[in-house]
Image: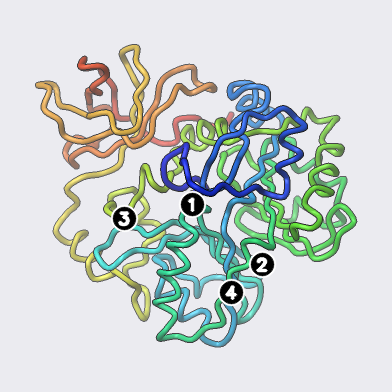
Amino acid sequence: MYICAQFFNTVNQVKRTPLYHKHIALGAKMVPFAGFEMPVSYSGIKEEHRAVREQIGMFDVSHMGEFLVKGPSALPFINYATSNDASKLSAGKAQYSCMPNHDGGIVDDLLVYMIGENDYMLVVNGACLEKDWNWLSEINKKFGADFTDVSDNIALMAVQGPKAMQALQKLTPVHLADIPFYQFRIGTFAGIQNITISNTGYTGAGGFEIYVPVQVAAEVWDAIMEAGKGFGLMPTGLGCRDTLRLEMGYCLYGNDITDTTSPLEAGLGWITKLDKVGGFVGMEHLKNQKGQGLKRKLVALEMVDKAIPRHDYPLCDAEGNQVGFVTSGTHSPSLDKAIALGYVPTQMATEGHEVFVGVRNKLTKAVVVKLPFFKQQ
């Protein structure tokens, strides 16, 4: 999740998050991304990556989209639009899900937050915001839920790493250790009331995501930077966010999952409840796909030969016949080896199977491995 479309997404009109001036002051390298001018790195991707894995890093992810859904028809609407079962949520819990299209592809992946009875927040990818809003608005015509886009009112900071809890606890009376994974609390943070503190993230390193009104974003950023000084906190950019999520095998919308890939093919069957009461968009298509057997699967690949696999590189069999393609690839800073995700025929998706990546007209050997690439110690 969290990074929609291609990694560097050039747009005609670029917006700025409320933390833009903080990034400039810190000397960040800025790039156009998801319609915003965003920091890709400050001190360097590898150094920032290590900080998150070993200590603590902070990301500005205010480009994300937030929709509020309220009223008696909120849950039926959300449950029909998403593949997971939002009826299993209770107040203070969040859920990872996706929005299938009518053909079983994926409109976007998202988080569903249950704030209270008949009161939800959907968090969607920034570059998909307009597409998601239009898609959901069309579905909502038959439900009539109170549906509001509050993206421009909310800033979001992701504070990730093994020391994140210690640093953030200095800023809130909320007992962070009492917030389980994929749960959240609303309380006082950095002296500001009604702040959402969520035990979620996209790095596999632990930590929290802090939702704040845009008016206080800079104030909260400064407070976190100050609280994290003794814990080695570094500002971290989109570059290491991508290497961190890929080490965990987390899907990136626009690369690993798209309008033409199904959640079943992408290994997201665990968020695809095909027995959900009331059904959801595309459910029958996905049932048929499962019944007939998947023709391809998203797999994790570790390079055996020396090469860096990149998005859209061909995946081939031993004879050089193209059988699939790389969706995401990088050199893993934690493992010091090249890794990738990509789609291959189901019969080639077993652990240990050799696959060949076409790199500059040369076949380079890789092997299918089990996710995540990076195992926590």
Percent from the top left, x then y, of residue 25? 77, 32
Query: Residue 245, relative to residue 172: is it above or below?
Result: above
The answer to whether residue 171 is left or right of residue 62 is right
- Is disc 4 placed on a helix, strand or loop? strand
Amino acid type shown at disc 2: Gly
First in sequence: mark 4 vs mark 1: 1
Q: Quadrant of residue 180?
A: bottom right
Residue depicted at 33% across the width and 71% down the height:
281
Q: Is residue 351 left or right of residue 239?
A: left
**Residue closer to the observer: 43 or 13:** 13
Instruction: State the CA–CA distance, disc 4 to disc 1.
Output: 18 Å
Residue kind at label 1, given as amino acid type: Ala
> Is label 1 in contact with label 2 (beta carbons under 8 Å)?
no
Q: CA distance from mark 3 to mark 1?
A: 14 Å
Which residue: 65% across, 61% down?
A: 152
- Indicate which label's residue lies in the foreground, 3 or 1: 1
Is residue 120 placed above or below 222 in the rendered structure? below
| Camera-side mark, 1 or 2 | 1
Q: Quadrant of the C terminus?
A: top right
Q: Which residue is mark 1?
A: 127
Sequence-first tag of 3 and 1:
1
Which circle marks residue 148 in the picture? Answer: 4
**Residue under the point 19% across and 42% down:** 346
Using the image as rendered, state which of residue 46 and residue 374 is in the foreground: 46
* Circle 1 residues within 10 Å: few <14, some 14–19, many ≥20: many
Q: Which residue is mark 2?
A: 92
Relative image position of residue 357 (x, y in whole percent): 25, 23
Dots 4 and 1: beta carbons under 8 Å? no
Q: Amino acid at mark 4?
A: Thr
**Quick check: marks 4 and 2 in contact, CB under 8 Å?**
no
Residue 153 pos. (x, y %) = 69, 63
